[in-house]
Every structure is written in structure tokens, then in C-alpha cells.
Amino acid sequence: MKILNKQIIKDVAGVKIKQLDIFSPDIAANAQPGQFVMLMASENGERIPLTLVNTDKIKGTLSLIFQEAGFTTQSLGRLNPGDSLYSLVGPLGHPTEIKKYGKIILVGGGVGIAEILPVARALKKAGLPAGQAGNHITTILGSRNKDLLILEAELKSASDQIYIMTDDGSYGRKGFTTDMLKELLSKDKYDLIYSVGPIPMMKMVAGISKEYQIKTLVSSNALMVDATGMCGCCRVSVFGEVKFSCVDGPDFDGHGVDWEELEKRNKVYSVQEKHICNLKKNNGDGSIFPRV
Ligand code: FES
């Protein structure tokens, strides 16, 4: 669980995205695309799930990419090479189903792009007997602007075609990933769509692909506590059935997800999160205990 390398992928306009390479041979040996780990940065910290972006079975390492968004991810971001995580459990969740589908569109938004990468690489190679081509991969990446786009080069090499969309038009085309998705679906036939990113984006992706009746997998980013199916925190309704993201997912059929419920559940602790961040800021020393 020792951190071997730390890379600051983005530090722009208050957005910090970092990569940690961690020595964990058992997890690296068993991990498959789409799976995640649960970690605690420190003994008193909370547990957070992070998708395995890369694993090296020979070196026994795994890579995690995360955006500093709250107290725990900021604590994680302060760790350095040589430090160790307090705990790391994985690989968790079902792997993404990797097989020959044909033509696939991958849609990644924001830091969700990191989660697309291992799936893109595996699907690209998922040819049948040697010599046959793998899936044909078209990737659509979206970010607010050019400065915040991550892993473009890596996804370019795992894709046959790539389209970049930025909200402000500073790179690629101006618009949203869903604009490009609509354009592609209106011109050609596809066999699978796989999407990871903000909930509103995945919800729109699923809404668009439903009209074309194309199988659509989304990697749900539900809140998690124990990640073993015991606490019920990560409940997601799929086609009216209650599923747990940690043990039944994280991938679900996007056409069956109750998106309104998922959005509501993910905001349930936003007041408490804001409160902790304010305490930390006011105390000025990173502590979260109210001063009296
Ligand atoms: Fe507790 Fe999934 S995180 S049941």
C-alpha cells in the first residue's frame, strides 16, 4: 500500500486532479477493467471508492486518478511517495463485460475519463482469435475547457476515432459529448455505448441511446460506505429492482437506471460535506473540529 509515485495531472483554476501509483501486488494481479478499490487515506478518514485506472501485474502496481473535491480527496492528495495508505481493499465490483461487440462508442466526461481508459484498452484488444480485429472504438471526451481535459493521448491510442468536446470551444468542438453522440448515432449504426462521467451526462447519454435501442452501460458513481453489500448506501434502482453498486455494479444498463433517485441520493450529504470543508478552512490547520 506504499505510494511509489505521485503525479499532478491538472492544477488549474482551483481544479486539482492527481494520480497515485501504489504498490499492491495482490490487487494488481487480480484486477480487471471496470473494477474499483476502497481506500482510507488515514486511520480517521472516511472510505472512498476509486476506479483502477491502470495495473501492472509484473511490477505489482496500480494507478488511481482522482479529483480533489472534498476533505478526503484533499487528504489523499497531500500524501507523497513513500507514504502508505491506511487501508486499501480490492479489486471490488464486477468487471466490465469485455467481449467482441463490434462498433462501440465510449463517452467520458470530466474525471470520469480516467475510468474509461482501462475499458477502452480492453475492448480494443477484445478480438477473437489472433489476427482478427478487436472492437472498433469511437471515443468522445468532454471537459469544460482545454486545460481540464485529461488522458487525451492515452485514449487516442486506445481508440480508432476520437472526438473532443469543450463547453467553451477552447479545444476540439464547442458543445457537449451528447451533441457529438447524437451526430454519430444519426449517421451510423453502433453496437454498444459505454459512459462514465457526471450523472447528468450519463443520464442524457442513456436517454439518447434509448431512442436508437443501443445497449448502454454506465458506471454508476453511487455513494459507498463499506463496499461489501452490507450498508445499503450505494442503492440504485435498475428497471425497478434495487441493486447495490458495490456488489451488483458498478456497471448497469443505463436504460434502466432511475436517474432522479441516483441524483438525489448522491446529494444527501452535501450539507455535511460543505460544513466540514468550512471548518477546515476556518481552522486553517486542516483540522475538522469546531473551535470553541
Ligand atoms: Fe454499502 Fe454498497 S457501499 S452496500
Image: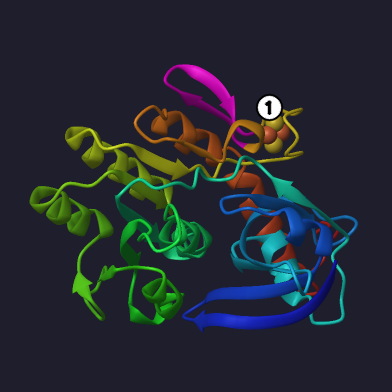
Instruction: Write the start and end of the magenta stretch as one range.
Output: 234-245
On whether ligand 1 comes within 8 Å of the CB at mark 1, the answer is yes
How far from the left and from the top, in percent, is residue 78? 75, 76
The residue at the point 48 percent across, 34 percent down is 262
Residue 110 sits in quarter = bottom left
- Classified by dominant secondary structure, the portion drawn in magenta counts as strand
Q: Is residue 270 left or right of residue 154?
A: right
Q: Is residue 174 magenta?
A: no
Between 43 and 186, the residue placed more toward the observer is 186
Between 124 and 187, the residue placed more toward the observer is 124
In this rendering, the count of numbered labels is 1
Q: Is residue 240 magenta?
A: yes
Q: Is residue 187 left or right of residue 230?
A: left
How far from the left and from the top, in percent, is residue 62? 71, 67
Asked if residue 282 can be seen in this view, the reply is no
Q: Is residue 32 left or right of residue 1?
A: left
Between 133 and 47, the residue placed more toward the observer is 133
How far from the left and from the top, in percent, is residue 80? 79, 80
The residue at the point 75 percent across, 72 percent down is 58
Q: For the N terminus, give its image quadrant.
A: bottom right
Q: Is residue 24 above or below residue 199?
A: below
The residue at the point 69 percent across, 54 percent down is 31
Asked if residue 78 can be seen in this view, the reply is yes
The residue at the point 31 percent across, 52 percent down is 104
Looking at the rendered structure, the kind of residue marked 1 is Gly
How far from the left and from the top, in percent, is residue 144? 34, 69
Q: Coloring scheme of the render?
A: rainbow
Q: Is residue 282 above or below residue 262?
A: below
Between 231 and 278, the residue placed more toward the observer is 231
Q: Which residue is mark 1?
A: 232
